[in-house]
């Protein structure tokens, strides 16, 4: 049986994904964790981060004309801000 991936490694991968925007394939080779596994726990870790910090998080939506999503992580001091632009067209 395979060993479970430690919570520390899951958090490292998630924070790297947010901070750099690396692809899951890139993270797969960097951490030696299959991208299908990363895609499975990524949402779980993000939910845990949100639930732990939700009183400190402010969500801002920017609406633009094209229809696709852009996620831009920005690191300011000790804060991580993720800007999600909803685009139409």
Image (cartoon, rainbow, N blue to C red):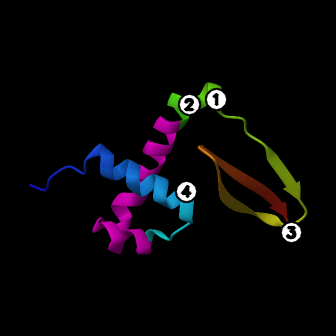
Q: Which residues are magenta?
A: 25-49
Q: Rounded to the nearest whole Å, what is the CA distance between mark 1 and mark 3?
A: 32 Å
Magenta highlight on residue 37: yes
The residue depicted at 68 percent of the width and 60 percent of the height is 72
**Mark number displayed over residue 89:** 3
Image quarter (top left, top right, bottom left or bottom right) of the C terminus:
bottom right
Disc 2 designates what residue?
A: 53
The residue depicted at 51 percent of the width and 69 percent of the height is 22
Q: Is residue 4 left or right of residue 43?
A: left
* CB contact under 8 Å: marks 1 and 3: no
Magenta highlight on residue 29: yes
Residue 68 x/y as whole percent: 75, 64
Residue 83 x/y as whole percent: 72, 52
Q: Rounded to the nearest whole Å, what is the CA distance between mark 2 and mark 3?
A: 33 Å
Q: Earlier in the sequence, mark 2 or mark 3?
A: 2
Please tell me whether residue 14 is drawn above or below residue 78 in the rendered image: below
Element at badge 1?
helix
The residue depicted at 84 percent of the width and 51 percent of the height is 62
Q: Rounded to the nearest whole Å, what is the CA distance between mark 1 and mark 4?
A: 17 Å
| Label 2 crowd bin: few (<14), some (14–19), many (20+), radius 10 Å | few
Q: Earlier in the sequence, mark 2 or mark 4?
A: 4
Residue 24 x/y as whole percent: 45, 68
Q: Earlier in the sequence, mark 4 or mark 3?
A: 4
Residue located farthest toward the top when viewing the structure as drawn: 55
């Amino acid at each position: 049986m395979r060993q479970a991936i430690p919570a520390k490694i899951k958090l490292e991968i998630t924070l790297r994904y947010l901070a750099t925007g690396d692809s899951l394939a890139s993270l797969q080779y960097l951490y030696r964790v299959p991208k299908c596994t990363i895609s499975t726990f990524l949402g779980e870790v993000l939910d845990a981060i949100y639930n732990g910090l939700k009183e400190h998080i402010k969500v801002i939506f920017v609406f633009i004309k094209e229809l696709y999503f852009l996620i831009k992580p920005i690191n300011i001091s000790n804060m991580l801000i993720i800007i999600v632009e909803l685009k139409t067209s």
